[in-house]
């Protein structure tokens, strides 16, 4: 390859990289619109078992957008903690009763005083195996994992 050709190829590569970096925010916006709806993580059930959990172990892929509904059906006070996981995702929004919360940082935990749901929309960022728990109810099985590959 001649010196002139190498410079042309190198210049083209730099321009291509610059175009990708400039489009980064636009690509992230498109990513959130193509999110995958995960199966609901359900705490308790309609039959009165407050300590059963549906879909307690969740697997995700880094770099993908997701929507997860956390649904409390039981009549316990569920304090849902996934602190480490919350730190390593990019938050798009939190939705409670069709009201959206947008912000720059992760919440500490979600608390359900009554049956209801909280939906979170996010992009999984850092691979790892994270635990979640309903604080105080872990010994009764109200806990699980979120694995990001």
Image (cartoon, rainbow, N blue to C red):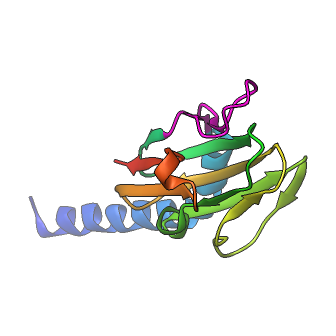
Q: Which residues are magenta?
A: 36-56
Q: Quadrant of the N terminus?
A: bottom left
| 143 within the magenta span | no
Position of residue 116 measured from the top left corner of the image (x, y, whole percent): 82, 43
Along the line of sight, the residue nearer the viewer: 95 or 49: 49
Position of residue 76 measured from the top left corner of the image (x, y, whole percent): 73, 49
Tell me which residue sits at (64%, 43%) in the image.
Answer: 68
Along the line of sight, the residue nearer the viewer: 128 or 62: 128
> Relative to 143, is 105 above or below?
below
- Identify the residue at the far left of this view: 1
Splitting the image into 4 quarters, where does residue 48 fall? top right
Splitting the image into 4 quarters, where does residue 74 fall? top right
State left or right for residue 34 relative to residue 102. Answer: left
Q: How many marks?
A: 0
Position of residue 10 measured from the top left corner of the image (x, y, whole percent): 26, 66
| 40 within the magenta span | yes
- Identify the residue at the far bottom of this view: 105
Tell me which residue sits at (90%, 47%) in the image.
Answer: 97
The answer, for residue 27, to whether it is visible in the render is no
The answer, for residue 144, to whether it is visible in the render is yes
Position of residue 122 measured from the top left corner of the image (x, y, whole percent): 61, 54
Tell me which residue sits at (49%, 66%) in the image.
Answer: 21
Along the line of sight, the residue nearer the viewer: 35 or 3: 35
């Amino acid at each position: 390859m001649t010196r002139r050709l190498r410079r042309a190829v190198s210049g083209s590569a730099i321009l291509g990289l610059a175009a990708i970096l400039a489009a980064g925010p636009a690509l992230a916006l498109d990513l959130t619109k193509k999110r995958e709806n995960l199966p609901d993580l359900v705490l308790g059930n309609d039959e009165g078992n407050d300590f059963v959990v549906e879909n307690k172990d969740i697997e995700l892929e880094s770099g993908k957008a997701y929507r997860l509904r956390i649904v409390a059906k039981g009549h316990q006070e569920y304090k849902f903690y996934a602190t480490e996981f919350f730190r390593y995702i990019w938050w798009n929004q939190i939705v409670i009763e069709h009201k959206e919360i947008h912000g720059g940082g992760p919440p500490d935990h979600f608390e359900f005083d009554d049956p209801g749901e909280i939906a979170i929309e996010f992009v999984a960022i850092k691979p790892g195996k994270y635990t979640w728990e309903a604080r105080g109810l872990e010994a009764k099985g109200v806990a699980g994992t979120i694995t990001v590959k």
